[in-house]
């Protein structure tokens, strides 16, 4: 089911403009950069710590689980480069949901969801990677 949903997200609703926008968002979200920048601009040390904790926790889980990134075949390549060959959980989702919660929640969760959605849209994460990352980020910000 995970693979079927990924294939659906990777093949439906794509336009050159949306693909470019998703790629730009993905680059902005590498290692939580956009969320760390927002926390720095807000001078929110707690948010900085929460985002970094989510990133560290995500990295540790990736090293234990070691799930490889999806490969949909030569006819359907990923639309964005990745830093690592490991997929589970999504660091973009983890840092986005941790950052959104730490910086006040509300509409920021919508921005986090859009950031997380770019990952299967671009073909670099299974949907369950994104759900696990979002849950991790949310849990880290709640517990921190």
Image (cartoon, rainbow, N blue to C red):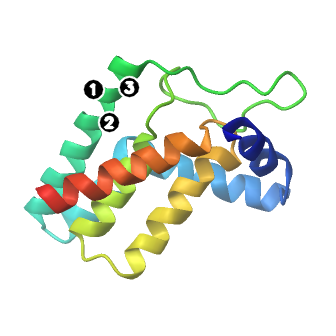
Q: Residue at x 38, y 57 (%)?
A: 96
Quadrant location, the C terminus: bottom left
The answer to whether residue 105 is seen in the rendering is yes
- In front of the other: 75 or 36: 75
Position above or below: 39 against 61? below
Disc sitting over residue 26 in the figure: none
Please give left or right for residue 77 compared with residue 22 in the image.
right
Mark 1 to mark 3: distance in Å? 5 Å
- In front of the other: 42 or 11: 11
Pinpoint residue 61: horizontal percent, then vertical percent: 32, 28
Mark 1 to mark 2: distance in Å? 5 Å
Callout 3 crowding tier (Cα within 10 Å): few <14, some 14–19, many ≥20? many
Circles 3, 2 touching at the beta carbon (< 8 Å) = yes
Pinpoint residue 33: horizontal percent, then vertical percent: 35, 49
Circles 1, 2 touching at the beta carbon (< 8 Å) = yes
- In front of the other: 53 or 39: 53
Callout 2 crowding tier (Cα within 10 Å): few <14, some 14–19, many ≥20? many
Q: Residue at x 34, y 19 (%)?
A: 63
Disc sitting over residue 58 in the figure: 2
Please give left or right for residue 46 compared with residue 101 in the image.
left
Q: Which residue is mark 1?
A: 60
Q: Which residue is mark 3?
A: 62
């Amino acid at each position: 089911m995970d693979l079927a949903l990924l294939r659906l997200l990777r093949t439906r609703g794509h336009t050159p403009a949306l693909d470019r926008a998703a790629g730009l968002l993905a680059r902005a979200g590498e290692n939580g950069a956009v969320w760390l920048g927002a926390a720095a601009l807000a001078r929110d040390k707690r948010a900085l710590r929460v985002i970094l904790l989510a990133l560290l926790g995500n990295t540790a889980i990736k090293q234990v689980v070691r799930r490889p990134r999806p490969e949909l075949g030569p006819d359907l390549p990923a639309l964005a480069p990745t830093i690592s060959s490991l997929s589970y959980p999504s660091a973009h989702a983890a840092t986005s949901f941790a950052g959104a919660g730490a910086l006040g929640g509300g509409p920021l969760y919508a921005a986090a969801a859009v950031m997380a959605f770019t990952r299967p849209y671009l073909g670099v994460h299974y949907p369950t990677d994104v759900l696990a990352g979002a849950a991790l980020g949310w849990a880290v910000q709640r517990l921190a």
